[in-house]
Amino acid sequence: MTAGPAARARRHTVRWTARGFCAAVRLCGCALLVQGCAYYNGMYNANRYAKQAERSERQGRPGEASDRWRLAALHAESVAVRHPRSRWADDAMLVRGRALVHLQSWNSAVTVLEGAVRTAPAGEQRLEARLNLGRANLAIHRYPEARR
C-alpha cells in the first residue's frame, strides 16, 4: 500500500527537521572554530610584532621598532578587549604593557601593567609585568611605586 499525502508530508517534515538541526549544529561548530582561530590569530600577531620590534631595536632601527610596537599593542588590546576572561588575556595585557613602555606611553602602560600584575599567574609572567610597571613608574617620577 502507498502512504497518503499526509503521511508523506510528515515524513518529509521530520527528515527536513533532522537535516536542519544537523546543519545548525555544524554552523555553530564552524562559528566557534572561526572565533577561536581569530582569537589565537590576534595573540599570534601581537607576539610576532613584539619579536619583530625587539629585533629592529637590536639592529638599530628605532622607527621600524616603534611601528612594530604599535602593531603589537593594537593586536594585544584587541585580544584583551574581545576576550577578557580567556586564558590568554594575561598574555595580551603583558604584551600591550610592554609595547606601551617601549613606546614611552608611560601613563597608559602603568594602567595596563597594574592590571597585568594583579591577574598574571605567579612566576615569570608576573615578574616581567612588575619589572615593566617599575620602569613606567620610574619614567613618570613615581618613585615609591617604582620601588615596590
Image (cartoon, rainbow, N blue to C red):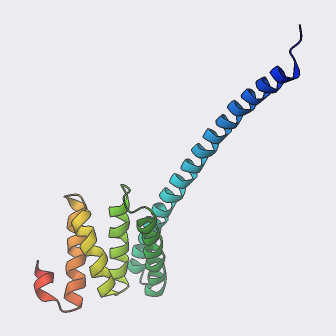
Q: Is residue 74 above or below residue 38?
A: below
Q: Quadrant of residue 17?
A: top right
In the foreground, 35 or 99: 35
In the foreground, 52 or 44: 44
User: Does residue 105 appear to the left or right of 20 in the view shown?
Assistant: left
User: Does residue 146 appear to the left or right of 69 in the view shown?
Assistant: left
Residue at the image point whose x is 11% and y is 77% from the top: 148
Q: Position of residue 143 (x, y in %)?
A: 13, 88
User: Does residue 90 appear to the left or right of 123 in the view shown?
Assistant: right
In the foreground, 17 or 3: 3
Q: Is residue 115 above or below residue 125?
A: below
Residue at the image point whose x is 38% and y is 66% from the top: 92
Q: Quadrant of residue 109?
A: bottom left
Residue at the image point whose x is 72% and y is 27% from the top: 14
Q: Position of residue 7 (x, y in %)?
A: 81, 20
In the foreground, 36 or 125: 36
Q: Is residue 105 above or below residue 58?
A: below
